[in-house]
Structure formats: C-alpha cells, structure tokens
Amino acid sequence: MNPGEDGGTQVLALIEEHRDSIRAQLTEEQYALLLTRLRELADTAPDDERAVRRALQAVRHCLVPLPFGHPVRKALDSVRLVATAPVGGPVVSRSRDLLARLTLVPPPPPDTPAIIAAVERRLLQAPALSAGEVRARYDGSAPPPELIRLGDRYPEFQFRPGDGTPYEVVLEVNRVLLADADPWGAADWWLSGNAWLDGGSPAALLGVRPDRELVGAAVALVEGD
C-alpha cells in the first residue's frame, strides 16, 4: 500500500490486493454482506464526508471475521479511518471500480436483502424494551440520542439491571460507532462475538471487562488502533 494514501483508499487497496483470499475465507453470507456494503459506499455522495466515513466503517466491519493470520486482518490494525477525513471523490470512485471487479469474479452472491433481513431478525430476538417503556424512564422526555433504537425497540443490554439507567460506556461506545446513523450496525457490534475481546460479545461483557477495553475494541474497529 502507498503510505501516502488516506485510510479509506488503503482499506479498498487491501480488498483489491487480497480479493481472492477474502472470498475464500468469508462465508457466503459474510461475502454477500461485504458486497452490499461496498455497493452502499459506491452509491454514497462523494461530497458527504461523514457518510463516506460511515460507509467505510461498515466495509471494515465486514472484514473483521477474517482469521487473525490473514494479511488483511493484520494490516487493518494499522489503517486509520478517523485520523484524517477520507477524500470522498477518490474513495467512492475507487469503491465503484473495485465493486465491478469483485462482482465479475465470484459466483452470484445470495439474496443480499434476505441476508440483511436475517441479520435484523437475529438482532430483534435479543431482549429489548419498547419505546414507551424507555420514555417512561425519562418522564416522557426523549431518551439520550446515543441509545440504539431498532424500530420501536431499545436493546435491553444498554441499561443497568438495577436502576435501569444507561451504562455510560454504552453511550460512549455508541458515539464511536455512530449508532445514531447506523443503529443496526452498532447493535450487531454489541451482540456479536468480538475478536478483540477474546470472542465474547461486548454486550455480555458489560460490567465484566473494564469499560476501557470495550471502548478500545470499538475504537480499534473504527480507527485501526
């Protein structure tokens, strides 16, 4: 990779360089989701830097399931997406070129809308509070915008079992993950196994692992630290 490239084009360069091994290491579902996220990046308005960065985070998230020994997984730890804002035009253009090459080589992916719907169904199976229940905790006022809301449900892991208040670390991590813009992606991060946390899901580790480790795992995903 060219050290002068920004983090966004470095991620795309990694995918281009190792596209065959990425295809071989990811499951059909994981690879289809990667293609979907790349399409979303390719369709992003180039002048919307925040949207470009958010789409790049989603692409990066799709690469986390790669084995630790995979060159892309190793290199991701040194790629930063937040330290410098991506140059929207080149990143979006490059994602379009890359997507064209990726979709020409592998067999047609599964029905990606169905896959995304399956992921959403899995997330909705987690214990949750209704929007009305959460508003009642705030005397009818709007709850903190950092909380993940999936439709009319708030995943229950965000709240302390005792007094029902949100965990401060949850609010902090949700800010890092831009949960207000991508609540489904943030919920998937919390409720899925995490390699930075020895395979445990961050939600299950609330109050078990130090808060700084949970924040660090989120930052590692976003910034590549």
Image (cartoon, grey):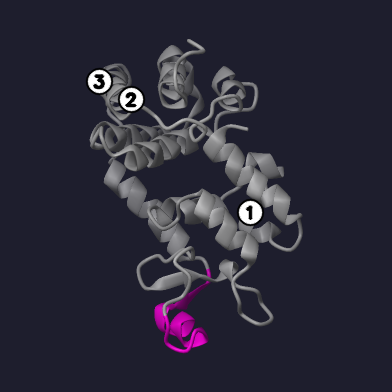
Which of the two marks, 1 or 2, is nearer to us in this view? 2
| Percent coordinates x, y for residue 130 in the rendering | 43, 79
SS of the residue under disc 1 = helix
| The stretch drawn in magenta includes residue 168 | no
Instruction: Work out how far the residue at label 1 is from the one at label 2, CA to CA, in angstroms.
Output: 30 Å
| Image quarter in which the C terminus is found | top right
| Percent coordinates x, y for residue 171 in the rendering | 56, 62
Label pair 2/3, CB-CB below 8 angstroms? no
- Which disc number belongs to residue 91? 2
Which of the two marks, 2 or 3, is nearer to us in this view? 2
Amino acid identity at mark 1: Pro
- Which disc number belongs to residue 100? 3
Residue 108 sits in quarter: top left
- Above or below — where is 131 with respect to 29? below
Residue 102 sits in quarter: top left
Instruction: Work out how far the residue at label 3 is from the one at label 1, CA to CA, in angstroms.
Output: 35 Å
Residue sitting at x 28%, y 46%: 113
Amino acid identity at mark 3: Ala
> For mark 1, what is the residue?
202
Specify whether residue 29 is in view: no
Of labels 3 and 1, earlier in sequence is: 3
| Percent coordinates x, y for residue 139 in the rendering | 47, 89
- Above or below — where is 10 with respect to 174? above
SS of the residue under disc 3 = helix
- Which disc number belongs to residue 148? none
